[in-house]
Every structure is written in C-alpha cells, then in structure tokens.
C-alpha cells in the first residue's frame, strides 16, 4: 500500500503505544499521510482517538514481526513493550519484536529511498559504570537476567540496523530513548512516575524499590517527540543518538514531588530493588545538542502537573464506570459475575451472554460498514470478553451437558475470527460474527434459560 502521492507517507509501528500515539499526532500535524501499525499487545486504541478523526491516518492491526505491506518514505519503528511489567510478561515476544521487527523493517526499506527511525533505549547501557552515559559507552548488561529480553533485544536490533547501513547503505537512525513520561501512559505499566502518580491519587502508599537513592532522568513526551521529529527531518547521520532530559533526580526526590503536587497524604514504603535495576541513569545529550539543537524545555514539575491531571481524569472516569457497573450488577469480566453473585448464577450468566451477543452485533456492523477504527476496537474488546467468559461457562456446565458441543464450537469460532483478523478479511469477520457467533451465543442463552 502506497499512500503518499502528494503528502509524504510515514509508517509508525507501535502506533497505539504511549510514545507512538504522540508521534502519530505530531506527524499528522506536520502534514504527513500516516499509517499506524500495532498488534495491541500493550497498545491502547484510545490513545489514537485524536488521530482517528483525521482522514490522513490509516490504522492496521498487525505485527511488526510479519512482512510489512506498506510503502513509506519514513518508517518509525516503535513497536515493543517498554515497561518492565509489560516486557517481562512475555519475554519471548519482547525479544522477537525487537529483533525480527528490525529485520522486517530492513527488508521493507532496503533498496528504496526510505529513512528508518528506530526506537532503541537507554537500557542498552544496562547498569552503567559510566555516568552520564554517552553514545560511545558500550554498556554493562546482564545477557541472561530478567530484563535481558528487552536490553539484549534492543542491542541486537541496533546491530542489525547498523549492519544494514554498512552493507546496503540503509538510512537507519537509531534513537536511544531515556525515561519518558506524560499523558497516555498506561495506569498500570509499572514505571515509576505512573506508579507514584496513581498511588498518590488513590491514597495508596507510594512503593519505593530499594532505598530511593537511585537516580533517573525524566523527559516529558512533547520534548521527546520534538527530538524524534528533528532526527527524522534532518540530513542523514550515522551512529546512535541519545534523547532525554539530563536533569537527574533520585527516586525519593520524585516521590516527594509527586506527593506535593497531588496534595496526597500517602506514606512511603520500601520494597527490595528488582534484579539488575540500574543505580543511575542520565543521558549525555551533547550529540543531540550539536546535531539537532535539541534541548528539553519542560521542567519536571510542569510535566508532572500535566501528567497528573491526565491520570486524575482517567481515574475519575474509571471509578464512575466501576460504580455504574456495580449498581447494575455488572462486571468487566463476565466470569467474575458468576463467581461474585451466587444467588442466581444462571441469570447472571444469561445477562453476560446477552451482552456478548449485542457486542458481536456491533462488531459485525462496524466491519460491514468499513468503520475501521471502531471495528478494530470492537474486535479486540469482543474477543477478550468472550475468551474471559469461557471459564464461567465451564463452571456452569459439566462435561456431559448439552452445552459441551456448543462450547467446542465457540472455541473453534474464536480461532477462525482471529485468523480472519490476521488476514484483515473484514467481510469474513462480519459473516462469522453475524451468522455464526450471534446464533451460537443466543443458543447458549437459551440453554442457560432452561
């Protein structure tokens, strides 16, 4: 697919992520035709609410580890879980996303007038013995530790891209991104700023891993995106480049600042530091200053105020949803409905199945009418909820029950839907949902009712 007849076309992998979505917004504002790719392993489609209103944005659910079918003049490779909780959840997927993703990008860009901007990380420096960290430092990384899937995956991706530059002249520009924060960070991603902000806003103790003397440097998202854009639009250069804010703070200093800005009375609690956790992390941005005239503008206090305001609004919305669900006797997880209310489990299960049937109808309609973003959101939500409904059905029915065969059909149908989604066959998805899934769920409703 080539879209840039008049506008330049940019492909952003990991487009639904925290950094990727902000980058998409910036590229659209600069007049690019933008294709966003994300497998939604950790991305959130709500991050693209602004972009989806722009006719020059095109979203695809896909995996960067698979062959890429988009022609673009600029490729921003930002696909990879970036928080410890996320990248340690599935280390194999994390490492292969970094390495195979870089390989796919090289295969697509090789031999074309194409610039690759690759998101590497300060984690390539490991627990550094040099402070601050310049690009010339090779790092101190444990190759078999809990963090290795991310650290070594990013290091290997850098090697692959540099070899492609040396061998084929690929215009590959590698950014080593240091700690970044701002609106759209996941509330539960385990990073220190999101942890502290959410805990303070909810009145929970702020968890400090270690004694709090370890230091970090925090760059607000707008400053980072500005640096990324400057890298993408300047003349070619070789070698990696650090992007981040060199201001250095201890974790204890950060915790106290968050408490002050949120006016929270939360206490501080200490927990053991995780393995291979770096003692210090601070970027040497001399090269970025010289090549890009890059200098972060937003102070930690200002950035925290903006970030906390975003977290506060999302927490309020989440709380309101939870209250509304509780009043209606509903749950985000249909399996929890049966477990929580045992007075009439068949009625609760019937309500959950009815809700799933309505969701299937909405999802099928979105695919049938070509509302791509709504279809993508609805599909992920529907498959996730139906998958989580299965345990409740297994609790409700024994092996010899008439529903057993229907349950087998449900599992097979989910597999067919996922296969059709991978093939981007929207008509097939609509047919499966409307003509097979809805009758199947209605049949389960009838069995429960009897």
Image (spheres, rainbow, N blue to C red):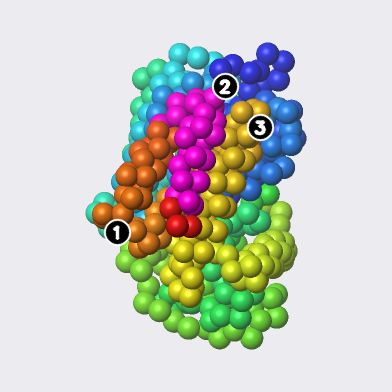
The residue depicted at 48 percent of the width and 75 percent of the height is 343
Q: Are marks 2 and 3 in contact (CB under 8 Å)?
A: no
* Residue located beneath label 1 in the image: 398
Q: Which residues are magenta?
A: 419-446
User: Which callout, 2 or 3, points at the residue further toward the start of the chain?
Assistant: 2
User: Which callout, 1 or 3, points at the residue further toward the start of the chain?
Assistant: 3
Q: What type of secondary structure mainly makes up the magenta span?
A: helix
- What numbered label is drawn on residue 72? 2
Of tags 2 and 3, the one toward the viewer is 3
- What numbered label is drawn on residue 139? none
Task: Return the residue found at the far front.
Answer: 450
Q: CA distance from mark 2 to mark 3?
A: 23 Å
Residue 116's spot in the image, x, y percent?
A: 51, 28
The residue depicted at 39 percent of the width and 43 percent of the height is 410
Compared across the picture, whether 342 is left or right of 254 comes to: left
Q: CA distance from mark 2 to mark 1?
A: 53 Å
Q: Does the magenta-highlighted stretch encompass residue 433?
A: yes
Residue 187's spot in the image, x, y percent?
A: 57, 62
User: Which callout, 2 or 1, points at the residue further toward the start of the chain?
Assistant: 2
The residue closer to the viewer here, 238 or 179, is 179
- What numbered label is drawn on residue 371? 3
| Position above or below: 383 against 163 | below
Label 3 crowd (10 A; few <14 / some 14-19 / many >=20) = few
The residue closer to the viewer here, 33 or 367, is 367
Quadrant where the image shows the N terminus = top right
Label 1 crowd (10 A; few <14 / some 14-19 / many >=20) = few
Q: Quadrant of residue 105?
A: top left
Q: Quadrant of residue 36?
A: top right
Tag 3 secondary structure: loop
């Amino acid at each position: 697919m080539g879209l840039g007849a008049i506008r330049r076309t940019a492909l952003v992998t990991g487009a639904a992520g925290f950094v990727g979505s902000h980058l998409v917004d910036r590229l659209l504002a600069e007049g690019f035709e933008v294709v966003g790719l994300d497998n939604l392993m950790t991305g959130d489609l709500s991050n693209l609410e602004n972009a989806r209103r722009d006719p020059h944005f095109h979203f695809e659910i896909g995996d960067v580890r698979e062959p890429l079918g988009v022609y673009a003049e600029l490729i921003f490779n930002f696909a990879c879980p970036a928080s410890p909780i996320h990248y340690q959840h599935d280390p194999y997927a994390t490492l292969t996303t970094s390495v195979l993703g870089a390989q796919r990008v090289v295969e697509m860009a090789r031999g074309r007038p194409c610039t690759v901007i690759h998101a590497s990380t300060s984690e390539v420096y490991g627990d550094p013995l040099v402070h601050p960290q310049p690009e010339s430092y090779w790092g101190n990384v444990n190759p078999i530790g809990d963090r290795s899937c991310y650290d070594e995956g990013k290091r290997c991706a850098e090697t692959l891209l540099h070899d492609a530059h040396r061998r084929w002249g690929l215009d590959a520009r590698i950014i080593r991104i240091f700690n970044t924060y701002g609106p759209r960070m996941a509330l539960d991603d385990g990073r220190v700023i999101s942890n502290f902000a959410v805990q303070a806003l909810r009145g929970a103790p702020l968890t400090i891993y270690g004694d709090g003397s370890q230091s970090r440097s925090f760059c607000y998202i707008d400053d980072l995106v500005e640096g990324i854009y400057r890298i993408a639009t300047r003349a070619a250069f070789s070698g990696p480049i650090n992007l981040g804010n060199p201001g250095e703070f201890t974790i204890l200093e950060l915790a106290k600042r968050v408490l002050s800005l949120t006016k929270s009375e939360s206490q501080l609690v200490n927990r053991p530091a995780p393995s291979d956790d770096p003692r210090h992390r601070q970027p040497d941005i001399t090269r970025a200053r010289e090549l890009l005239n890059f200098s972060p503008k937003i102070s930690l206090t200002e950035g925290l105020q903006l970030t906390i305001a975003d977290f506060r609004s999302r927490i309020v919305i989440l709380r309101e949803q939870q209250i509304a669900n509780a009043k209606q006797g509903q749950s985000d997880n249909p399996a929890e409905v049966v477990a929580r209310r045992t007075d009439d489990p068949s009625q609760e299960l019937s309500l959950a199945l009815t809700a799933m049937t309505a969701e299937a109808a909405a999802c099928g309609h979105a695919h049938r009418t070509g509302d791509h973003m709504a279809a993508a959101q609805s599909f992920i939500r529907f498959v996730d909820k139906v998958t989580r409904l299965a345990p409740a059905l297994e609790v409700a029915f024994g092996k010899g029950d008439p529903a057993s065969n229907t349950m087998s059909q449900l599992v097979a149908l989910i597999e067919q839907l996922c296969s059709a989604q991978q093939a981007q066959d929207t008509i097939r998805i609509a047919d499966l949902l409307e003509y097979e899934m809805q009758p199947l769920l209605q049949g389960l409703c009838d069995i429960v009712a009897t």
